Image (cartoon, rainbow, N blue to C red):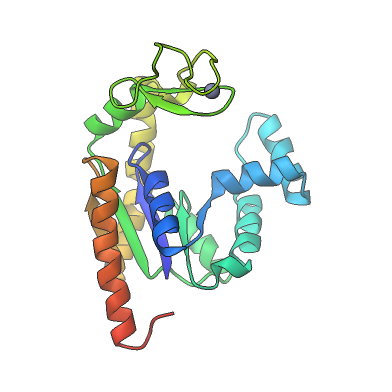
Amino acid sequence: MRIILLGAPGSGKGTVAEGLRSAYGFPKISTGDLLREAVREGTPLGIVAASQMGKGGLVDDATVLALLRERLARDDCRGGHVLDGFPRTLAQADSLESIGAPGPEVVFDLQVSDEVVLRRLTNRRTCPKCEAIYHLLNKPPKTAGICDACGTALVQRNDDTSEVIVERLRTYHAKTEPLVARYAAKGALYRIDGDGPAGAVLGEVRKVLDAVLGRAESTGTGE
Ligand SMILES: [Zn+2]
């Protein structure tokens, strides 16, 4: 089953993708993870990506697509995958098709109100050393401002301040809503209420996916 997750920053896509991986075994593919992995391993594409990021820019779509093409060809993707964070725009969806990737069978749109996103992200604190993530309201560290795991002082990421989040949300709505409309027109779109706690959101996604998988099986078109 080929699955795409859409949702604003802070909508919980990463948590849902991880839940789908552990429940169904579909690998979770995020372009952020792919870039970090390629840079860490110093692959030819990783070297290109590192030099673009080093100049303070974004990695270009051609490099991201090359990484995706290579990732989607690996054995563990034969039964499907969950794409988290790509495509975000119509142009990216087109470019994904241009490398021969078949379109998604299921697209989940995690719908979260801007207010909830702001509350989630402005309270987020991360550990710069071990990358543990805390939330001042829902998952505070035992000692204020200090990582439970390694004792390092927690920081707020620059892109988790409210001005930046409002801007990211505006960009998200402008660029991604046309993509949502396209997938809806293809009958692949499922809207999920993402305002609730992570467990409830994942439960809702799984309920829909089980129904789709059951239908695919009974008509003999499943994997
Ligand atoms: Zn830590």
Residue 60 visible in the displayed image: no
Going by the picture, which residue comes out furthest to the bottom?
Answer: 220
The residue depicted at 24 percent of the width and 40 percent of the height is: 197
Quarter of the image for the C terminus: give it: bottom left
Residue 1 visible in the displayed image: yes
175 versus 69 height, above or below: above
Q: Nearer the viewer, residue 181 or 142?
A: 142
The residue depicted at 24 percent of the width and 32 percent of the height is: 116
Q: Quadrant of residue 46?
A: top right
The residue depicted at 54 percent of the width and 61 percent of the height is: 95
Q: Position of residue 164 (x, y in %)?
A: 40, 24
Q: Position of residue 14 (x, y in %)?
A: 42, 45
Q: Position of residue 31 (x, y in %)?
A: 55, 49
Give left or right: position of 160 versus 64.
left
Ligand 1 quarter of the rendering = top right
The residue depicted at 42 percent of the width and 71 percent of the height is: 1
